[in-house]
Image (cartoon, rainbow, N blue to C red):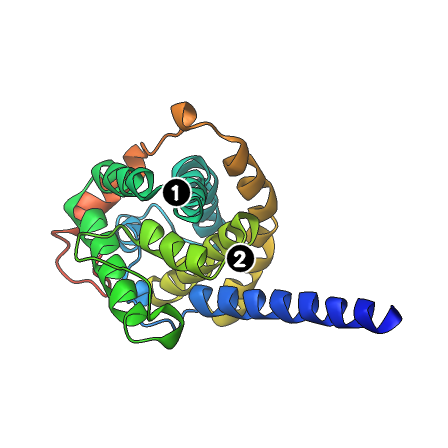
Amino acid sequence: MGKKKVMAASFTTSRRARELLWLLRLSSPALPVGAYSYSQGLEWAVEAGWMEDELSVAAWIEEHLTLVLGRFELPLLAAALRAWARGEDTEALRLNTHYLASRETRELRDETVQMGYSLVALARQLPEFSGLPLEEREWAYPVALSRLAAALRLGEVDLLHGYAFAWLENQAAAAIKAMPLGQVAAQRLLSALSVLIPNTCEAALALPEAAWCSSAPGLALASSLHETQYTRLFRS
């Protein structure tokens, strides 16, 4: 009896470890989907003088995390994951269309479509997804990600935390490139802002679709003006 319990515990631990490793892999900046090439308006905000130091960068990123990701991207990501897991493909694809329609500028729409395309193209080359149907379409990145996460049976709480931290890490990296902000300052940003992720994810999971909100005028303005910025490092 004791041996069976040990074997069951080992299996559970092993499965949890695989889930964690896949979460880390899908959240990694090394994932070849091009996330590093986007600043999501941050580069123009720096150019315009909206951000001049570590504190103002932290305020910009915090508002984006809690008011944009937390009120739209994260709840939609969780809903898409649930839909795929239940075999409700039509519902997941509706959410894909909804996400694409929510992008307020060409840059932001092109960003999610390019990253979604790259993620699906990558999945087609990996043995873990060899039997997964991934048809040709304009994939919003969060919905494509949720498709792979559902196939791997990742939990929605884990997925949301991984997605939010990957986004946060990418914003900190963009800030380093766009302004005089060192590596240590970027780590301080991660320390200050990563503590917001658990509550942001919890609130996102409790938010009904009728309360989702993707409107972010400052972000939309920064993104639209970035399209014509004279010199730039990032694609958005």
Residue 91 visible here:
yes
Q: Position of residue 211 (x, y in %)?
A: 42, 24
Does residue 235 lie above or below 107 as drawn? Answer: below
In which quadrant of the rendered image does the C terminus lie? bottom left
Most distant residue in the right direction: 2
For marks 1 and 2, give the one nearer the viewer: 1
Q: Position of residue 166 (x, y in %)?
A: 45, 60
Element type at mark 1:
helix
Q: Residue at point 50% right, 54% down?
A: 159
Residue 68 lies in quadrant: top left
Q: Which residue is tagged 2? A: 189
Q: Amino acid at mark 1?
A: Glu
Q: Residue at point 56% right, 65% down?
A: 19
Does residue 63 lie above or below 156 as drawn? Answer: above
Q: Which residue is tagged 1? A: 73
Q: CA distance from mark 1 to mark 2?
A: 21 Å
In which quadrant of the rendered image does the N terminus lie? bottom right
Q: Position of residue 77 (x, y in %)?
A: 41, 45
Q: Amino acid at mark 2?
A: Leu
Does residue 221 lie above or below 115 as drawn? Answer: above
Element type at mark 2:
helix
Q: Residue at point 17% right, 46% down?
A: 225
